[in-house]
Image (tube, coloured by chain):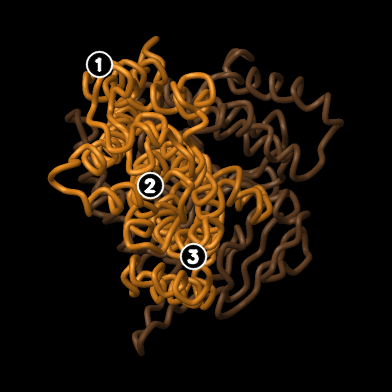
Chain colours: A orange, B brown
Amino acid sequence: MAAPSAPAGGNKPRSKALAAFFGNPLSVLGLAIVTVIVLLSVFADWLTPYPEHVGPIGDFAAMNMPPDETYRLGTDTMGRDLFTRIVYGYQLSLIMAVVVLSIATPVGVVVGLVAGYKGGWIDYALMRITDIFLAVPPLVLAMAIMGFLQPTLMNGMLAITAMWWPWYARLIYNVTRAEAQEGYVLAAETVGASTAHILFREILPNCWPSILTKMTLDIGFVILMASSLSFLGLGVQPPTPDLGSMVAEGAKYMPDAWWLSVWPAIAILIVVLGFNLVGDGLREAFEAES
Amino acid sequence: MSEPILELNGLGKTFEADGNRVVALSDVSLTFARGGCHAIVGESGSGKTTLANLVLGLMAPTAGEMRFNSVALPGDRGKGHRRAIQLVQQNPLSALNPRRTIGASVRLPLDVHEIGTSSGRAARVAELLQEVGLEPDYAQRSPRGLSGGQRQRVAIARALACEPELIVLDEPTSALDVLVQARVLKLLERLRVEHGLTYLFITHDLAVVRAIATTVSVFQRGRLVESGPVEALFAAPQADYTRQLIGAVPVVTEEEARLRDAIRAGAPMPAAGPGA
């Protein structure tokens, strides 16, 4: 009955969250990985030893070179520096992830908010559409879209976006259903606030922890999905450096020229791991906050 | 008694789902005088929360009508009625958005109803906070660091921001400990007098009723059992159910136990203080 009336004291929720994040070595490791990858991608033109190798032409005198002092990770079949190509692959992957998520997230969030708050037939219609998208295996849907359209970077992003928003709709739908029961929503209703205010100013701020956590985790997964598509030859086309197609290309030369596919594969592993560690850290931090 | 602010005529609410009919409220006719604190008591499932929801316009009645200031209340409330009838909820922990500042929560009604100029609203928020006994610098704080009593004060400030005529208090102190409860009741009483407010005070706590209410209406299973001024009803409860309800109040002292036994026996109640 009697609620604890003692104040939480001077312990600000935000500082608690920060302490939880930085207190976990795995989160810090993830943040370090993500920071390095982002910096490398943004400043790729200055930080890579052979930025000219991003195109089709490399050094034909140095094709399929194993890792050595000149080419730290070796060169590919065109004599292009693998490290340079991996960094530009990261750049492309991050751009794709950002574009996909910056479309999929708002769409999914709005659908989830409206369906979860309004209920009734609106809920039913929106969530059944969402379910239809969720019922199709993601890679199959993307392959269908890519097979139907041209396998270009643009269509790749379109395909991944089309299959990604329903997950946000589902997530935010569930959060909204729970939040709509909270007293502050009732309070906003009784003072006469508009539906838009209740959705975007009252409920949405309480969705941010879920959204940010999922987005961070998803950057890794979108990169993985884009790589899977290009591994299958349905994504980015040569000579654009892409981690997935580099793995596919290099796999033909296994095990002699192992570096061709092993390094890009490890690169995918590292970036997915990095974003996952940060995402898990964020989740724990948000839990510590509330 | 002054003129009525709220009249209920044959009000009823029946929920129907999958062929099940639940009568939550049936044939309730009551008149609430302006400026009073009208307690609605009853145990869980007696229909008192349904009554609150109907008055607030959160659901539409299935029978009867409500008149507010002698004008029929429409099922779909306009902004004016929304503003005039406010709510303070039971659970102060959930009533404030944890991700908005205290100031934003109190300011919301001012923005919604366009009360004052946008620059004057911040000052009004500070004023409202002071009025409920909080420092103005609470406006920048998150509700997370506040105690239950402080949060309830913020919720009261928010209701007050609408400049309402009627406030539905849905067990506003039942989640608070006894000392805090007494202070919040005192605050509510002061605000009622100063602002000429009318309260619809929903509670199951008869000690609170005796402390603050002017009239009391007893509900049981969706029906109005008994209604009248507090002193009269406590002194001589007419209905068996009311006697049981008063008799069920937990007692601490031997004197209270004697009082209770007297009430159970149906004897008139000696005039006594609210006992806290």
From the image, tell me which residue sits under label 3: A151
Question: Which residue is more in the foreground, A51 or B31?
Answer: A51
Which residue in the rendered view is the most extreme toward the front?
A: A61
Residue, x 62% and y 31% (percent of image)?
B157
Residue, x 70% and y 28% (percent of image)?
B194
Label 1 – label 3 distance at C-alpha: 44 Å
Disc 1 + disc 3, Cβ < 8 Å: no
User: In the rendered structure, which amino acid carries the disc numbered 2?
Assistant: Ile
Question: Which residue is more in the foreground, B172 or A135?
Answer: A135
In the displayed structure image, the side of residue A201 where residue B275 appears, left or right: left
Say which label, 1 or 2, has the lower sequence index. Answer: 1
In the displayed structure image, the side of residue A95 where residue B276 appears, left or right: left
Residue B220 sits above or below residue A39 on the image: below
The answer to whether marks 1 and 2 sit on the same chain is: yes
Q: Which mark is residue A223?
A: 2
Say which label, 1 or 3, has the lower sequence index. Answer: 1
Q: Which mark is residue B87?
A: none
Question: Which residue is more in the foreground, B31 or A150?
Answer: A150
